Structures are given as C-alpha cells and as structure tokens.
Image (cartoon, grey):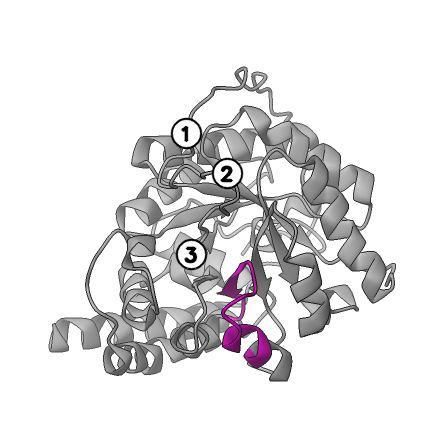
Amino acid sequence: MISGTEPERRSVVTAEPESPREVASPGMTSRAEGDKQDVGGLWVPIVTPFDSDGSLDLESLRHLADRLLAEGVAGLVALGTTGEPATMTLEERVAVVEVCNQACVSASRPLMVGVGTNNTETSIHEAQRLGSYPSVAAVLVVVPYYTRPSEQAIVEHFEIVADESPAPVVMYNIPYRTGRGLDAEALLRAGQHDNIVGLKQAVGGIDVDTLELLSRPDTGFAVLAGDDAFIAPTMLLGGAGAIAAAAHLCTAQFVEMARAAQVGKADQFHTHEPRDAGRATELARRLLPVVRAGFAEPSPAVWKGALARRGTIDTPYVRRPMTVASSRAIERLLSAVRQAEEEAIGVG
C-alpha cells in the first residue's frame, strides 16, 4: 500500500504546444457549415498514472492510451474527473494532454479534454489553450460546482464558453457531484448553440428528463451515458454513446456492447454491423459486476488499483484527498473482470 503522507513532487517540464494546424481532428468527420461535430461512440475518461512519489508517470499513460485505442474505443477523454485534474499543476495538465494527443493522432482517433470549472472565464481560458492540438474534437464542460448558480445562469455559462472555445462543447450534467443539475428543457435550450454538440448525462440512472431528451429527434446534440451501469439502456433508447471509466478494463467487451446497442448511424463506430439489442443486453448483464466492483470505493482508486495489479500502470497511486483502494475492493474488481473474460471466451 502507498504511504498516506503527501509525497514531494518532481516538477514536470514540457514543451509549449506546436502552433495550430489546419487539419480535421483524427477519427472525426469534417463539419460542413451548419453541421455539428459527431461525438458518438464509447469514450474512456483516462486515468492519470502517477509514480510512487506522486509525480506523473507519462510512460504508463502512453501505454494505457495506446492499449485503449487499439481495443477500439471511439476516443479518449483527458482531464476528466477520473484523471484527477484538480490535483495537478498547469504543467502537468499540459503534459497529460500532449501524451493523449500524440496517442490519438497516431491512432487517428479523437480526443476530448475536460476544461470545466466553476469560473466561466477560467473555463474559457482552459478551452482556448487547446486550439493547437490536432486531435482535440471537443471539450467537456461540467455544470459549475459548489457555487450553485441558477439554471438560467448555467445555460448561459455553457453558451459563453461555447462562444469562445475553439473546439465544440460537450455539456456535463452530474448533479450529485456539482450540487446543481439541469432539467431537459434547460439542456435543450443550451443545446441549440451551434458549438454545443453533446451532453454527458450522469444523474444516477435514467430519469424522466433523460427519457425526454432521448425521445426527442431534434435535441441538436448527442446524449452520452455518464453512468456506466446504464450504457446499454441509454443507447438502446437513442443515446449516441458513453463516457465510461469502467471500460479501462474489459475494454473490447464494452466497445462491443456499445456497438450492439447503437441506434442510427453505424459510422460512429467505423462499422456497418446492425444493432443487436439482445447482444447488448447480454453484455450489459455480464459487465455489470465489473461496473459495481469498480465503483465500490471512490473513483478512480479501484480502477487504478486493478490496472496496477495487471501491470498496465506501475502504481495504484492517487493524490490526496483521495486514498488508494483497499486490497479487498481491488480483488473484487479483478474477480469480476476474470469472470467476464472467462464468459467471453466461453461464448465466443
């Protein structure tokens, strides 16, 4: 186990991003005037590996990013909550984005980057830093947390950031973390903005507002499942994809589940296989124990613990105020993963 004392951190020296390039984001189609960027598919909000002294482990990050992309995920999300950006310096955040950008460019896949804060100007500034990265297809902007602005103020926050962001905006509605959420009507208002292309909906289930969004053909944005246990039902009801931390493990099975549950354009997954609700349901049943075990303790501790046990990253380290997962929780997750892998082999 890692010591609970705060480690001395090494500084991270990184080069400035290259000047902007006039290229389309890899893995994403160029937008015609008036069209919105397609952000469908299964995305993984990648963890940020650390060394045992608490410094960034960029080599493990590179290895993990390459493995996830090789197993078929639609794209990566850097600096999401799972990536622990609140504990990182600006230099460290730049270094993480650079590694993820390089991996996505090499794999011809898109990158989404978390830039949302509870300060509108800061969120704009973070988004504008990303204009020089060719793989950045979207920025993830969370509902402002802790300050609890009004619903209309949150809509305006999304619109103002979208006005100034060089990349399209994916809204992130997660009331159990932010203390404030948006109903369907407010999300539909915000989604009419030309530069708002998606919504990560994480409300702890599929509520009436989510059903309202999924039932509407004219939302103007892609609805992405933000609660990993509800990927298949969200997509079967019309969702465009998911942002799923659980897909760090059993990645290919999560990709297959999302592909099977997909409604509409098959190009989101670079395939023309038909939707298969039965297969999606079976995979959802198989993967549910993985999801439940991985979130048994505060995320991303259990995911990082399992990744470290399997040799994908070097340590399970998480920065304070988080603490490393218990051995019992990690064993339960690894057991669920082994069971899912054995079932996959057994049924083909």
Q: Position of residue 169 (x, y in %)?
A: 61, 47
Magenta residues, start to end? 211-227
Is 44 left or right of 163, judged from the image as shown?
left
Q: CA distance from mark 2 to mark 1?
A: 28 Å
Q: Is residue 121 above or below residue 145?
A: above
| Image quarter in which the C terminus is found | bottom left
Residues at marks 3 and 1, CA–CA distance in whole angstroms: 21 Å
Q: Which mark is residue 102?
A: 1
Image x and y of residue 253, in percent? 28, 66
Dot 1 surroundings within 10 Å: few (below 14), some, or many (20 or more)? some
Element type at mark 2: loop
Asked whether disc 3 touches disc 1, contact meaning CB atoms under 8 Å apart, the reply is no
Mark closer to the observer (2, 3)? 2
Residue 33 is marked as 2
Q: Is residue 3 visible?
A: yes
Question: Looking at the picture, which amino acid does disc 3 mark?
Answer: Gly
Q: Position of residue 1 (x, y in %)?
A: 53, 56
| Residue 78 counted in the magenta span | no
Number of marks in picture: 3
Q: Residue 226: x, y in percent?
A: 54, 66
Identify the amino acid type marked 1: Gln
Residue placed at 37% from the left, 35% from the top? 26
Frontmost of labels 2 and 1 is 2
In the picture, measured across the screen, residue 73 lies left or right of residue 131, that is left
Mark with earlier residue (3, 1): 3
Q: Is residue 118 left or right of residue 205?
A: right
Look at the image and say whether residue 226 sits in the magenta stretch.
yes
Determine which quarter of the picture holds residue 309.
Answer: bottom left
The residue singled out by tag 3 in the image is 40
